[in-house]
Image (cartoon, grey):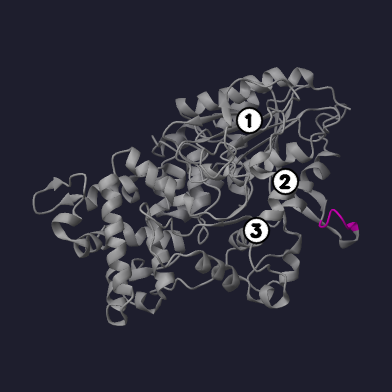
Amino acid sequence: MKLHTSWLAAVKLAVIFDPVTGIGLPASTLGRDLRLAAELGLDSHLALNDPEAFRSMIADSVDSTSAAEYTEVLIDHEDPSVGTYQNRFWVNEDFYVSGSPIMVYDIGEATAEYSVSLLTNSSSWLSLLLQEFHAMGIVWEHRYYGGSLPFPVSQDMPVEHLKYLTTKQALADIPYFAANFSRPNHPDIDLTPRGTPWVMIGGSYPGIRAAFTRNKYPDTIFAAYASSAPVQAQLDMSVYYEQIYRAMVANGYSNCTKDIQAALKYIDDQLSNEESSASIKRLFLGPDAEKNSNADFTTALVALYGPFQSHGLWSGNQSLHNFCNYIELDPATNQSAGPEGLTPIHGSEYVAERWASFPYFISLVNRMYGTNCNGLNASEPLSCDFSQINTTPELISWTWQYCTEWGFFQSNNFGSHALLSSYQTLEYQQELCYRQFPNAVQAGILPPRPRTESLNEDFGGWTIRPSNVYFSGGQFDPWRPLSVLSDEDWAPQGVNFTTEIPACGVSTGKDAVFGYIMENAVHCPDFQLTPAAAVSRNYFSQALKRWLPCFRGI
């Protein structure tokens, strides 16, 4: 055990409702840090307010014996002549007993080194699974992330080097690696999928990969656990904010949604006028904010929802819960607003100004976008420019993936439930792709729009029903609408979600999904240490215990 009791005592353990991120925070590493905080059961405050201290704490907790290892992988699985690269992975053999499975935890769109604690912390949810099944654990790093680089990733890299960053190529890495896997401590055991059942686990994009790999490479992956996996590629992801709206209304914040909408209408009206545009931008973000375009400026307002994906409405000072309590408190009466909010009493200008005065808003914007608006960090120069492109390697790589294949453009959910500015359009989201990769546009490498249709045709999207796979998710997960657990009226209809365990090797068919939805939960809610999360994981554990005896090897 390497996250020692004394270490844990030094950190305030979080009683958080919903965790884990993976997709949807495109301009900073906040998503990765919130994900780690949730997975390790730690308070999100440090991840939000002091990222360097948080990452240092996580890095220091990793067992020094869990050193990174490297395996040689083909850059192009369809053309070996392109060459190979070194892909990182980490292994924990502490609980392994001969004949037990190998569990691969896929990190997905982030550097993997900070997640190694899940292998070495004997009380983490992943470690508990390894102990339960006497399994060997592997943390796998995705190509083009962290230290697993076919080519160096930077804003100045030749865009041609990104053409091997595709869903298809990345999936093929797993069977290529597994086919020759061995350990010096177990020289007489066939640890490849020919002799040992491999189980793949992932949440969010890695959850997609777990399901897809079982579906495409069933001789490699015997079973999979796919948490909050949005398997349907889609250009328009405005439903992301529809889910936030639903969560707010269901939890008693409908008055807050009305005041947010009124504030946004006022803000957009001010932005439409050249004279008032500059002043409204400075009101929210301070000096130099007026230099941003209207679309870039209103991108900053989206920070209000940044913590929701990992922690739902409740994530401390910067949470929607805290924001709504602030904006709905009438200073004149010291009473909370009624169901219609404060706009009918004080007007839309008032609620917009109230939003701008929320004490934690600018700090949340700066954390999410890597800016220094209003000069909050006195040791750094003022920086409030939202037109800058991503320069962090892992963010460049993920931007390439959603701009070329997945889409997931989180534009405004226009209509009566809208939570964003009207300037947050699909066209603006596409422009961000062009802005990030201008040379790729000129070279014709970046498609005019993400190839979502072809990706769904290749891998199945909503219709995927591989055997030996457990799907889980949260009721208000912003990514649930694109998962097999979707209940949207534009998703496949007549699908029954059941916790009845299917027979080993038998697909449920198109009208059923073996899965579980956690009530009032958000993204990857079962990858944390709570009683509710344990219920979901137990469905997978019971299924795996029933499936494992039918493994025959090759």
Residue 214, x across and y down, in percent = 74, 36
Picture coordinates of residue 23, whole percent (x, y): 55, 51
Q: Within the magenta stretch, is there residue 78?
A: yes
Q: Is residue 342 visible?
A: yes
Any magenta on residue 375?
Answer: no
Residue 223: x %, y % from top left: 72, 30
Q: Which mark is residue 511?
A: 1
In the picture, which quadrant includes the N terminus? top right
* Residue at the disc numbered 2: 459
- Asked whether 121 or 154 is in front, the reply is 154
View extreme (right): residue = 81
Residue 360: which numbered mark, if any? none
Looking at the image, residue 289 sits to the left or right of residue 401; the answer is left
Picture quadrant of residue 436: bottom right
Camera-nearest label, 3 or 2: 2
Q: Earlier in the sequence, mark 2 or mark 1?
A: 2
| Residue at 65% across, 27% down | 130
N-terminal label among 3 and 2: 3
Of the residues shown, which amino acid type is indicated by label 2? Phe
Give the residue at mark 3. 401
